[in-house]
Structure formats: structure tokens, C-alpha cells
Amino acid sequence: MTYEPMNPDAALAKVPTELFIGGRWVSPGTGQTIAVENPATGDVIAEIADGGLADMAAAVDAAAAAQRDWARTAPRVRSDILRRAYTLMLERSDYLAILTTLEMGKPYAQAQAEVTYAAEYLRWYSEEAVRIGGRYTVTESGVGRIVTMAQPVGPCLFVTPWNFPLAMGTRKIGPALAAGCTCIVKPAKQTPLSMLATASILEEAGVPAGVVNVVPSTDSNRIVAAAMNDPRLRKISFTGSTEVGQSLVRQSADQLLRVSLELGGNAPFIVFDDADVGSAVDAAVQAKLRNNGEACTSANRLYVHSSIAGEFAAELAERFSALTIGPGMDPGTDIGPLIDDKQRRQVQRLVDDAVAKGARVVTGGHALDRPGCFFAPTVLTDVPGDALLIQDEIFGPVAPIISFDDETAVLESANSSRYGLASYVFTRDLDRAIRVAEQLDSGMVAINQGTVSNPAAPFGGVKHSGYGREGGPEGLAEYLETKYIALGAGTAPTSAGGIA
């Protein structure tokens, strides 16, 4: 069935507002609701169920009860379900994009791109579900055999962020379901609508009851801790702040849970003197302003060679100042609002600190005096090394430019951060590109491009940016345990073949 484009009111009327537990839409035990706001206006656009401790316990019960049957489900069946969900997401891309724009604030075109990106994780892992294997090896003595097999880890808990509410969900759900794991999703309280809509799509695609459960909540700390203390839960995957990730690692110790963490970023964006300035500026606009600058892979520190720093800053400022700022659903909007006023105040604090320490505002530098949580796209130059935004994740449309002259020195500066998620390098020298990429302390490096994410590639970082990988075959491995079976001499094939 093909869905016709709908208006925002129709999209909001269609989205489920209850908890999804055990294959049923149920009211919360708390009797409470979460008010979901549009950050472009501050208006409440939906009231959805606010899950509590009893609801999370029910979700763990459902995931644990469904685990054995789902693990035994034929890989082709799991694959076909994921493929149907992929198709349904694309058919309803308008509906999903509207929800994402309304609850998160990103421009509608970028929300459409997120729908496609999110769906691709379901397609990619639908193709991987039938390729999970093991190995058969003769022992070193020739007597007996070594057999290994991959089995699902078990029920998983996913705590997803507000900045990519669709894609960060499917990036976890896709490999988990492909591997044979059940799951509970706890979406961010600011952006639960798109995940509730995704749960409905997964249900329609044929996901059995209990395999996927969704529990939005304003009591995140308590319900997540309760789930992690349940011995039936075997893994947690979290995308969010480093501070919360550290807390979850400590909590995971009691049950020795498998843990995947995608945490904060402070990506260096390095432009060498031989780079094409125009191409580097294009990539900087993309890497800095995608998702309103609220991305963990966002270019946080722009290191530009002193010989081209002035030209680069002038071109970037011209591009920034020409952008249209407004609600994400308005045609022509390039930059939407930040997620809430707290985040806008944080961005302003970082800019003010840099300016007080000597940075120069080329364009922007201030919040907009209008309804909604808007901040002007900002370019700063002469940024000192002790400015807070050099070490802290900005999570907003602010581009601090730092000039450099020496490759060794810029590498030292780039690696000085406690974070190590993504890096960007611009140069026409292939030897330099490889040399610098190998020396950067980050889990991902983009060469001469402003994007790094791909469903077929491992996404993740080092240091305080977390551990574990999402995407690619590495992402599937996060949901599999290896079982070794020792075949004795009596069960190994005989010289005549066959199993004795």
C-alpha cells in the first residue's frame, strides 16, 4: 500500500501514543504522559505515554519470553521481515519525515534524508541475516575438530538520542533482529514520535510480539537501571553523552552486560594548504550544519592552514550568512532550531567564552530574537586554544577556525581532545592523507568529504567517544556470541568420509 503525502496534522493524528510492549499498544502504569514540543515554536504537538518501572519490567518480560523463538526463527524469515520494514519505511517517508521535523526541528529535506538512511540499516542487515556463519577446523594434532557457531547475545536494551531519532533506532534494531536478538527501545523523551511510528511499521512488517518493545519515559535513569539489573537482559547499546555512558558502564558491571557506546565527539576538520578551498568549504558547510549542527560527527574544530585561513573563513561566513533560518517544515529552510532552550543557552555560553578570550565573530554569534530555539550560524576566527568550545562538544551551528602551519603541530592539537569519534582531512596529497589518517586518534576519518556515516561501514569512536561499532559486519558482531564445539576423535569424519 502506497501512502499519499500528508500534512503535519494528519501525521500527528496517525502516530501511536501508547507504549508498545509484547506486540500490544498499552497504556502506561504511571497514568502519566509526556508533552512533546516543537522546538521551532515551543508548542506541544503530542501527548504520549510516559512509561515507568512496571512498564519497563513488562517490556523485559516480553523480550525475554520472545527470545528463544526469535533466535530459532529461520534467517531467511528474519531477513524478509527486515526487508519488508525497509520498504514500508520508504513508502511512508513523508509521514516519518514530518514527525522527525516536528519533534526534533531539522529541515524537512534533512528529515527525508534521515528516513532513507534509517531504512538502509534495515535493508543492509536484512542481507546480512542470512550470512551469519562459523568455521570448521581440523585440530593441530589432526585428532578431533574445532567447530564454532555464532549465536544471538540475547535480549537487548537500546537507549537512543534525540538528534537522529529514526536512524539511531534502526542502526541498533537492524543488526539485533538480524542476529536473532529481541530488544527494548527507550527513545529520548524529546523525540519519541518517530520511534513509536517505526514500531508500528515493524509490527506491520511481521515482527513477532515481544521482539521489539518501545517504552518512552521521563524517568529514564530509574527504568534503565532496573532493566540493567535484570539478569535476563544481556546487552545495552547507548547513544548519547559521555557522562551518561560512563554511568551505564558502571551499572553494567553487576550483570556483566555486553555494552556498546557511541558517545560525544569533538571532530577536527583539517584543511591543508594544498586543498581545494571551495570543495573544503562545501564540505565544512555539510559537516558543520547538518542536523542544525547537532550531530556527534559535526566538525567541531576547523584547523585551516594559515596560507588559506582568511580565504576559507570569508567563504564559509558568506555561505553561513546566506542560509535561511526557520521552522523545518517551511519550504526553503536551511537551518532549523536547536532542540530546546537549554541547548541554545549552552551554545551561547561557549561562543561568549571564546569571544571573551579573544575570538572574533565573522558572522552570527547570537541567538535569534524570535519564538523557538534558533541560533544564528556562526563563524569565529582567532579562536584561542583555551576557549571552552575547543574542548567541549558544541552541538550547534558554530564553526571555530584555528589556523596552523605545521602538520605535526596540527596533529598534536587534533589529538589533544578526550574525544575520538570522527575526523576530517582535506589535501590533494595522497601520502599525506594516509599518513594523517593513520595518526589521528579517532574511530573514523573522512578524506576530502564532509560525511562519514554509511550503513555498510563501522561507526564508532575511541577514548571518551565510546567503544563498540554500529554498521557493517562489525555492527552485527556486537549482537553475536561465539560458541565453540569440540568434536572428539569419535565424532570427526573418518577416512571414508561421513561422521562416525
Image (cartoon, rainbow, N blue to C red):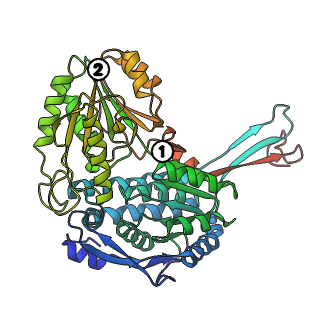
Picture coordinates of residue 39, whole percent (x, y): 25, 63
Q: Which residue is mark 2?
A: 272
> What residue sits 47% from the left and 57% below the top?
174
Q: Is residue 152 visible?
A: no
**Relative to residue 131, is residue 364 drawn left or right?**
left
Name the amino acid type tagged 1: Gly
> What residue sits 54% from the left and 58% below the top?
176
Gap between marks 1 and 2 measured at Cα: 30 Å
Label 1, secondary structure: give it: helix
**Residue 317 figure quarter:** top left
Q: Is residue 91 visible?
A: yes
**Which mark is on residue 12?**
none
Picture coordinates of residue 332, whole percent (x, y): 11, 54
Q: Is residue 416 above or below residue 118?
A: above
Task: Please identify the residue farthest to the right as the structure is shown.
Answer: 490
Q: Which residue is mark 1?
A: 472
**Residue 99 figure quarter:** bottom left
| Disc nearest the viewer among 1 and 2 | 2
- Bin the neighbour count of mark 1 within 10 Å (Cα to Cα): few under 14, some 14-19, many 20 and up: some
112 or 144, which is in the foreground?
A: 112
